[in-house]
Amino acid sequence: MSDTAKTAAWNWVDRNRSRLSEWHGRIWELAEPAWREYRSAAWYVDLLRSEGFEVEEGSGGMPTAFSATWSNGPGPTLLTYAEYDAVPGNCQAGTPRPGPRSGVSPHAPGHTDPHSALGISTLGAVLAAKEAMQRNGIGGTIRYTGEPAEKVQGSKVVHGLRGYYDDVDAIISFHPFYMLPLCNTVRWDTHCGAYYSRIYSFRCDEPETWGVADPGSPIPASHSAARAPGANAALMTMYSLTKSTQDSMAPAFGGWSLSEAILSAGNATADNLPAGIAQIQYSWRCPDIATAEQVLRVLDANAEAAARTAHCSLETRWVSRNRPGLANHAMAEVTYRNLAQVGPPAYGPEAVEVAREVQRSLGVEPTENPLLAECAQLIEPAEAERLLRENIPPAQRNWTSDDYVEMTHYAPTARLYIARPALAPIDGRPTPSWAMNALGGIPATIDPTIICAAKTIAGTLLDLARSPEVLAAAKAEFDERSADAPEALLPKDFEAPHDYPWPEYVTTARGSGWQGA
């Protein structure tokens, strides 16, 4: 039986392949990092308005977020979203050779996952579904949110707290695959876990009270006087303490990880004055909230001790604090049915030759089938779940992290994965990051991901808009699974920390460039 609505949506995607590819290239080249995606967000806002969406810029008090809405009359409200932040230190040109984009520092950001393809895939899906709904008289509302700062899991918790997901009937979350077996499939039971991220700021506001300076010197703690240890000492004490106590933070069973980043405070030209401020961000991924809270207790204790030792005051601020995700089989099933109808990404001769060129750049003899076989294969959600669970302790319910999990606490949500281009391993050798990143920026290799994802998501949106029984089943399952779920872990008035000194492009009298390059 033919489906004229889906045919219309998929035809839209096929007719607009070149536009989607061009759009992706634009976001790929902008490559703006978390909380600083000004041009990327503006591009989406302008495009959506030109396509008939009502768009709120700066949604949730986040300058680079947006919320777009289009309605075709009574019907369910369905949501998907864009991400568009890039990763500092991963500047790679869209070529089969290692090297940064032209005129840009190697330390500038680049799209690694790539979020550039994530956003253009969902954008293509909502525009295709919109046309099909108009042509076929299908009622309903499409909501499309711009979610900045995914790399610090920063925006979805804020949009959730501000009510942007409250009236949504279903959500489709998409990500290019990043680990097997989650390639061309939909998550089943094991969703991502808890993610906490917190900034510790040490301030040495009264260095003169550390000791008695030379009374003849107008500058406290002059060159010859004892000086306060200062904020840098506090930060390094915190860093060292945390490295020393990391093994004692949480049980080894279950898996968790901790990473840190030092934020720039600009004390490099302050002569001999003790550093007035130093900031360090810790982010930790845990399978459950109890483990995350135990890590938090140790970090807070280390920070307090470090501040006392170095004559500093301590301030803390959350970047993000997410709950583990909730599964929804009804949503997974309808999404995977559409993926099965569309089929996996199709890589043509040009894509194969690009992959062989990358192999040559790696000093590897080109192979007949250079791309990972799983990129062109489907795997049913239950089978992907079975394989995933082989390496996870039976009692562990969640694994890894991504901030889509917050969405799962507001509406029934499917988590879709479509293959991103990846090289097949040769003799067990890992693929270097530059090669993975490059394949995500070359049209011949990344366009198949975008086309497959756009068609799959568009078809799923249309099924949900026309299937009240599917939505009812998804809602009933959501109600059951969320009955004992924890409340949001941050207050409703929580403000995103976009005001911190995150990496960014800056324009000065020297021109426009990458901060710190």
Image (cartoon, rainbow, N blue to C red):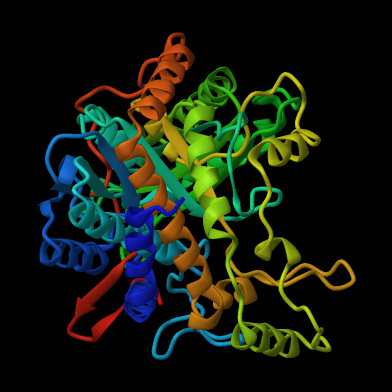
Q: Is residue 157 above or below residue 147?
A: above
Asked if one can make out residue 170 in the rendered structure from this viewpoint, the answer is yes
In the image, residue 217 above or below residue 409: below
Decide: is 412 above or below 483.
below
Q: Is residue 330 above or below residue 417?
A: above
Task: Say if residue 225 shows up in the picture.
Answer: no
Q: Is residue 476 left or right of residue 398?
A: left
Which residue sits at x=83%, y=89%? Answer: 365
| Of the pair 256 and 144, the residue shown nearer to us | 144
Query: Please, which residue is most extreme toward the front here?
Result: 1
Q: Position of residue 210 (x, y in %)?
A: 36, 36
Please name whichever residue, 173 or 257, is drawn nearer the observer in this view of the structure: 173
Using residue 386 as the reference point, say whether residue 214 is left or right of it.
left
Q: Quadrant of residue 203?
A: top left
Residue that protrudes farthest toward the right in the picture: 427
Front-most of 374 and 511? 374
**Where residue 420 sits: x, y (%)?**
58, 65
Q: Residue furthest top?
A: 484
Work out whether residue 513 or residue 435 is closer to the camera in this orientation and state it.
435
Locate the C terminus and report the quarter of the image it occupies: bottom left
Q: Position of residue 26 (x, y in %)?
A: 32, 77
The residue sitting at 54% across, 39% down in the picture is: 401
The residue shown at (16%, 47%) is 69
Q: Position of residue 490 (x, y in %)?
A: 32, 24
**Which image quarter: residue 390?**
top right
Residue lying at 23% horizontally and 86% vertically, measured from the top left: 510
Residue 127 as seen in the image, left or right of residue 402:
left
